[in-house]
Image: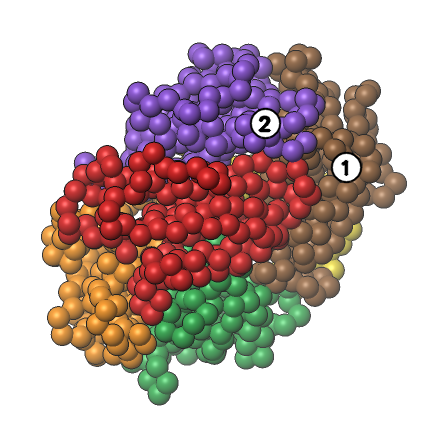
Chain colours: A orange, B green, C purple, D red, E yellow, F brown
């Protein structure tokens, strides 16, 4: 059950999130993998979570009416938010706002079939005071089995 | 004090950490910026911190005998570890081990000189049980003024 | 000052919280102990705290106008919420909602009188997305001297 | 995908952990479910995690060589430890020791087959100073899809 | 780069925050240091952060349009709030309110010039239920290089 | 149950911890209050906790063989450590060491007798890298009913 060099799901998701408009990945995701990307900006952490859940469902990355898939995604999102917020998963409550690009990727990164599908949620963008320019970059990655 | 497109220090550090052996960045860091990369693997979080501090000092990214520089680096490292550990900055205590590539970059990402230098610490690798193959990817980024 | 087998206050509180409508405990709390049970559901963590404080006061488990008793209860509630939320004591902010049964028990679980009264706050219910069925169970227990 | 009254996996696991020697559950787990119970005491959180992983594997609740199963169990254990430690998943580092009974249960608590198996890890015991009698009860529950 | 006995910036800030109306410090801050004091009370952590940022800017302790200075202050404020809230940087969400005096001090506490300026943010006041008298004292200190 | 101006237990404890050798408090603690002060330095958080527990017991601030008193002190110590460590109650694990003066004070800070005794634990000192001079000040305060 080794991680496959070409199937590093977290790295692929992160490269998607880091890609600027018009950039493409030099190595695309493996055949059969599903993914989506999007943008969201808010002081409201609830909206950040909701935007990613909506994107994953409308892109058919997870099945809407299977709770285990929502559960897997939710925890991957929360883990990615730990990286972005670094300590307390809070934004507006502590006077911070974020502008983020996100990528959600689904596939099996391991060399054995029985490992099944995994999800990676990558976030890249800025965090800072709600004043233009008073911000620096932030990154987060969450990975979960599905 | 806008973030400069070509000077996104966190993105540059993350791309360094994601780069496989032999890969080069399509857009190198701006002239005059300093950076180093390295690898560290351990169940001992103390060793992870020490390895990065040593690398930053021996590469002259920070000045060894100026405490404010060590202080800036320390907090950037801790923030990057939040992303990797996602909740509790603990490894062996909760039976986890990591194998990480790191990149430390120093420069001014803003369009105004008075913003001075900033540090980015990027981590990419795996986290998991101390059993080969029982691991998934993890990422962290910490940014601080220096 | 050993914990008395029949006076395990946390276990008693938890069994109350786990009891379905109509179920009774096979071993009731010791004579002279005070307790109450109730239900609360919300995305708003403030409401969860307030519902338990109100129940404890109106059931005369704690004295309303003695701050040390409110203080003891507050910390027991917060500790129980750590078990339910597992990481960040947040609900709506991270798009979660809970439906909980709670039990609050007061008595001396130790074999020596001078240990005085202790409080146990037990929570049992579900946590999940604000969508019916998208939820799993959660449990928390907080214990404090009073 | 409603939680089934008779299949509340967290409640079943918690009742197992609360059961004293010789006690049996009034409602046993559904047919086909797998579970184990055990005891562990330590100041060393690493040992607590290891004891439960070993029990789950030797009881064939999870498959030893499938990483996604280990991963699911690990996160359920960590979530249960949040309830026990209430704030920082630390024991000896902050001069605490625990004596715990644990129960690990695997089955599908939902009314639809596609929800698949879930894991519940329940902990019940005492936490306190490393001095006999200087301790109170603690409880934790972690639930994860597998 | 030793801390100078007379320049202990955290101690000076804390003594300012502890000083009652009309009290003066027996040892004033070193020449050339800048500082301000103020009061803020709220259940809303956002307002606490904003009140201190506004005071620091209007007292010219930090430069309004230099982001690195805002960034240094923000992290010092957050660290001070950890001390006040002890676990989760939350107030109203967990039904708590605070009434705080704050002091913000800027200067170089070290014996070498190259250590440059540092910021100390000290908080002293009460935290408790939103009921008069149901509260106890709380203290926090954050220190950062600027 | 108002806090008495002259009985602010947290402020008194903090002033003790801030006092340099030979300094005395301008307003001493109320008659009948008990207190002790001491010093401890370590990378090992376990030793910090143990040093304060030992001092409180040997100074008869708490009764050694009454668990509720040990329990009250333990939580006050942990809360003070949150202020010192600001995020994760860890020292050596994240390559930090502390040198602290502590003060432990016991008395009733409220104007009504039934509020009984409370404990304040104040910490003042330095935290930093295990290199002389690479450190800044840190402060923590924990308060609990006893």
> Left of A65 or right of it: where is E132?
right
What residue does disc 2 label? C109
Circles 1 and 2 on the same chain: no
- Looking at this view, name the residue that lies furthest to the right: F22
Disc 1, SS: helix
Q: Residue at x 56, y 46 (%)?
A: D99
**Label 2 neighbour load within 10 Å: few <14, some 14-19, many 20+:** many
Q: Which residue is drawn at 65% across and 52% down?
A: F45
Disc 2, SS: loop
Numbered disc 1: what chain? F
Q: Residue at x 45, y 56 (%)?
A: D52
Query: Where residue A30 sits in the image (x, y, percent)?
Result: 17, 75
- Does residue B124 appear in this view? no
Q: Tell me the quarter of the picture where residue B57 sits.
A: bottom right
Image quarter (top left, top right, bottom left or bottom right) of the N terminus of chain B: bottom left
**Front one among D43 and F107:** D43
Numbered disc 2: what chain? C
> Left of C77 or right of it: where is D114?
left
Marking on residue F56: 1
- Does residue B52 appear in this view? yes
**Label 1 neighbour load within 10 Å: few <14, some 14-19, many 20+:** many
Marking on residue B25: none
> Left of F48 or right of it: where is A123?
left
Query: Where residue B95 sits in the image (x, y, percent)?
Result: 49, 62
Q: Where is B25 relative to C1, above or below?
A: below
Query: Where residue A111 sits in the image (x, y, percent)?
Result: 26, 76
**Front one among F99 and A144:** A144
Q: Distance between the residues labelled 1 and 2?
A: 25 Å
């Amino acid at each position: 059950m080794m991680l496959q060099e070409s199937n590093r799901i977290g790295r692929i998701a992160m490269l998607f999130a880091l890609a600027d408009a018009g950039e493409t990945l030099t190595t695309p995701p493996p055949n059969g993998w599903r993914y989506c990307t999007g943008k969201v900006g808010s002081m409201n952490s609830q909206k950040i979570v909701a935007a990613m859940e909506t994107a994953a469902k409308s892109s058919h990355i997870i099945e809407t009416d299977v709770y285990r898939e929502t559960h897997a995604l939710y925890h991957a999102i929360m883990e990615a938010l730990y990286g972005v917020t670094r300590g307390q998963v809070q934004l507006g409550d502590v006077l911070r706002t974020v502008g983020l690009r996100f990528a959600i990727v689904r596939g099996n990164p391991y060399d054995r079939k029985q490992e099944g599908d995994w999800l990676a949620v990558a976030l890249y963008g800025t965090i800072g005071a709600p004043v233009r320019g008073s911000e620096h970059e932030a990154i987060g990655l969450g990975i979960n089995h599905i």
